[in-house]
Amino acid sequence: MAIQLGTAGPDEVSEVYQASRSTLIAAGVFSCLVNILMLTGPLFMLQVYDRVLASGSVPTLIALIIIVAVLYGYYGFLEFLRSRLMVRLGRKVEEKLRGRVFDAVTTHALRKTPGIGSQPLNDLATVRQYLSSQGPFAFFDMPWMPFYLGIIFLMHWMLGVAALAAAVVIFVLAVFSERATRGPVQEATKATVKAAVMTDEGRRNSEALFSLGMVGTMRDRWIAIQQTALDHQTIANDAGGMLGAASRVLRLFVQSGILALGAYLAILGEITPGAMIAASIIMSRALAPVEQAVANWQQFLGFRKARERLAQVLKTIPRDRQLMKLPPPQGRLSVENLIVQIQGVEKPLLQGVSFTVEPGEGIGVIGPTGAGKSTLARALVGIIQPTRGHIRLDGATLDQREPDELGAMIGYLPQDVQLFDGSAAQNISRFQPDADPDAIVRAAKLANVHDLIMRLPDGYNTPLGENGARLSTGQRQRVALARALFGEPKLMVLDEPNSALDAEGEAALDFAIRQAMQRGAAVVVIAHRPSALAAIPKMLVLADGKMAAMGPREEIMRKVMVRPTTAQGNVERISAVAQGEANG
C-alpha cells in the first residue's frame, strides 16, 4: 500500500514527481502539523473531564474554548493548504505531460497500434483527478498511526495493545481488499479500453455500418465487451464494498470497545475519565487513514494502473531532440536503396527503391494494387521510418529536421483525405494562427477551390464540420490539395490526387502540379489514372514492392496502349511488361 509519489524512476511521470519534490515535501510538512493539531479534540476532552469538571472553573473552560477555536482554525487553514498543493500537483502533471500524451495518441494512431486509441488521454485525466482528490492524504496520514498508538500506550498499556490489534486487523483487511480486487479491476480496464477502441471505429466507419446493415452486429459485439467490463467491475466493487463496510464496522466497534475498556480501567482507578474519552477519540483518528485508504482503494488502483500505462506508452515515443536548424531546402529529393519492412513480417513492403528528383522535376509512380505505392508516399513524408536505406531532402535525412519544420516544407495529399473540424481557411493554412490570408487564397486558387469556398455561407470562415462533413468527397480532395500547396512547399507528394475529381478538378490538379515544378519543387505523384501524370516527365513502376522500371513518361507509356477506361488494367500490364524485361 505504498503510493508511488516522489519515487525515483526512469519514466516521465516519475520525473514530474521528482521535479515537484518541494510540493510533496510541503504537503508532508502540512500533514505533520495537521496530525499534531488533530490532538486538539482529545486533549480538550481530557482537560474538560479532569480539570474543568473537577474544579468547576468557568474561566478555565472559556480559556480552553478560545485555545481550541484558534487551533481548529489553524488546522482548517493547513488542510486547505495541503489540498491546494495536491490540486496544483495534479495540474502540473497534466501540464507537463499533456503535449507528450497528445503526441503518443497521434503517433500510435499513425502506427495503427491496437488497443491504444485515446486511452493515454483518459489515463492522464485519471492521474490528475486522483492527485487532486482526498485519496493521497490517506498515505500522508498513515505514517502517523504509530504516533497515535504511542500516545494511547502512554495512557495505559492495555489500551495500546487493544488499539494495536485493531490496527493490524484493519490493515490485513486492506491488503486482502487489494488482492481481491486487483484481478477484476485489470480485466475490467482491458475490456473498457477495447470497448473504447470499438466506439472510435464505429464512429469513423458509421457510413459502412448503416449502409451494410452492420449496426446490430457491431452493437452486439460492443455490448458484449461492455458487459464483460461491467461484470468484472461489479465483482471488484462488491469485494471492495464488502471489505470497506467490514473496515468501517470494525473501526466503530473498536472505538466503542476502547471506550468500554477505558471505562473499566477508570472504574479500577488506573486512568481518569478524561483519558478514557481521549483514548477513544485518538483511536478513531489513528484508524481513519486506513479506513480512508480502503474506501478509496478502487480509485487508487485505477490511478496506479493509469500511471503505469501512461509511463509505458510514453516510453514508446521518442522525446524531442534539440536539432540544429538547417537552411530551407531547395527541393532535391533522393531515395537511396529504400527498404520498408513491418516488424514480424518477413516480406518487405518496399525493397531496393532508389531514385532522385531534382528541384523543378517530377516523377510519377504507378503499379498494381499492393505494389507499395502508398507505402512509398508515407515514407517520403516521414510517416513511415525506413528499415534500411535513406530518404534525403537536400542531402539531409528527414529525421534531421524537427517534425513540424519538416511538415511545413512538404505538401502531402494522402489517398484517404482527412480534414479537421475548423474553417476552410484554417484547414488550408494547416491551422497556423498567423497565416497570411493572401497565401491561403493563393493556395485555394491553385487548387481551383477558391470559387467553391466563396459560395459557402461565410466564405473562408465557414466551418467545414468533422472531417469536412459539409463538403462532398471531390470538394474535400480539392481543399486538401490547397492545404498541400499552402506555403509553397519544396516537396510535393500526391497520393491518388485525382481519385475523386471531375474534369474541372483534374485540370486544376494538372495546373497545380505544373506550377509547383515551375517554382522549383520536387513533385511525386502516385496515381492509377494516367490523367494525373500528364505534367510529369518521368515515371517509376513498382511491382511487388520493387522497382520494375523507371524512365521517361512517354517511353514507359508506350510499352502498352493506355486507355482511360482501362487505366488500372493498363498499369498492371505496364508493371508486368517491365518486370518481365527486368527479369529477362
Image (cartoon, helix red, strand yellow):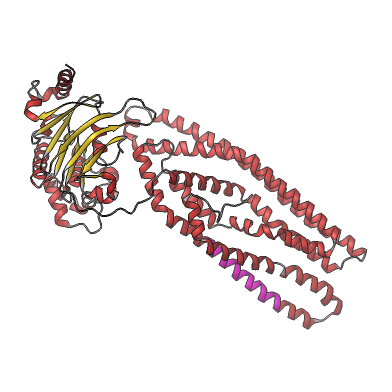
Q: Seen in the image, is 90 located left or right of residue 579?
A: right
Q: Position of residue 86 (x, y in %)?
A: 54, 61
Q: Quadrant of residue 479?
A: top left
- Tell me what residue is drawn at x 76 percent, y 60 percent: 149
Q: Seen in the image, is 128 located left or right of residue 135?
A: left
| Count of residue discs | 0
Most distant residue in the top direction:
584
Q: Is 68 part of what is drawn in magenta? A: yes
Whether 291 is drawn above or below 193: the answer is below
Whether 186 is drawn above or below 303: the answer is above
Q: Position of residue 357 (x, y in %)?
A: 14, 39
Q: Position of residue 580 (x, y in %)?
A: 17, 17
Image quarter of the C terminus? top left
The answer to whether any part of residue 160 appears in the image is yes
- Tell me what residue is drawn at x 75 percent, y 54 percent: 252
Of 581 and 553, the residue lying toward us: 581
Of 516 and 65, the residue lying toward us: 516
Residue interval drawn in magenta: 66-86
The answer to whether any part of residue 422 appears in the image is no
Whether 369 is drawn above or below 143: the answer is above
Q: Is 504 part of what is drawn in magenta? A: no
Of 182 and 506, the residue lying toward us: 182
Most distant residue in the right direction:
268
Q: Seen in the image, is 316 located left or right of residue 56?
A: left
- Tell me what residue is drawn at x 63 percent, y 73 percent: 73
Q: Position of residue 303 (x, y in %)?
A: 54, 49
Magenta: main secondary structure equals helix
Q: Quadrant of residue 360?
A: top left
